[in-house]
Image (cartoon, grey):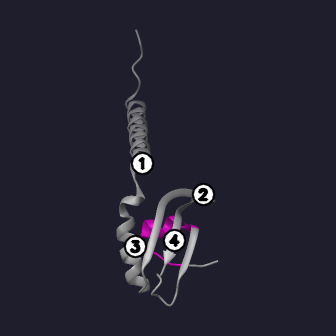
Amino acid sequence: MTKQPSQPAQRKRLLLYSFLTIAILATVSTAYFLFTFDLNNYRKNAEKELSTLLSLPVTLGEIEYKLHDAKPALHINGLQLGDSSSNLQVKTEKVMVALRWMGLLERKFATRFN
């Protein structure tokens, strides 16, 4: 005759399996989002918002997101601020914008230049 596990042991096992299932689903969902999300779909909108904010024409090249020192970062391949008719004109091949996890979670954005 086999001995049945006690009720608390069954509840713990059910709770553990439920937690593992949720963790696996969250991991798979996050991985799918990261592999299919393309920041370049939002490039024109970002250019428009930055142009309004800076009162200068802004042109962004290809945008990628990567981790930099365990923090999310945007890598922009080609950035131009201003144009031939602007007083200020800045053009660079590569720019990295480091982001803070807490700032992203709290939706607080601040700039800091090093």
Residue 29: image quadrant is top left
Q: Position of residue 78 (x, y in %)?
A: 52, 67
The spot of residue 52 in percent (x, y) is 37, 82
Mark 2–mark 3 distance (CA, rounded to whole Å)? 27 Å
Tell me the SS state at disc 2.
Answer: loop
Reading the image, the residue beneath label 3 is: 47
First in sequence, mark 2 or 3: give its number: 3
User: Circle 1 is placed at which residue position?
Assistant: 30
Q: Nearer the viewer, mark 2 or mark 3?
A: 3
- State the residue lying farthest toward the front: 84
Q: Are marks 2 and 1 in contact (CB under 8 Å)?
A: no
The one of 84 and 113 positioned closer to us in this rendering: 84
Question: Which segment is the magenta one?
Answer: 94-111
Q: Which quarter of the figure has residue 20? A: top left
The label number, if any, that marks residue 79 in the structure image: 4
Residue lying at 40% horizontally and 8% vertically, measured from the top left: 1
Q: Earlier in the sequence, mark 4 or mark 1?
A: 1
Residue flagged by tag 1: what amino acid is it? Answer: Thr
- For the residues bearing labels 2 and 4, Cβ distance under 8 angstroms: no
Tell me the number on the disc at residue 70: 2
Q: Around disc 3, counting alpha carbons within 10 Å, would you say few (fewer than 14), some (14 to 19), or many (20 or more)? A: some
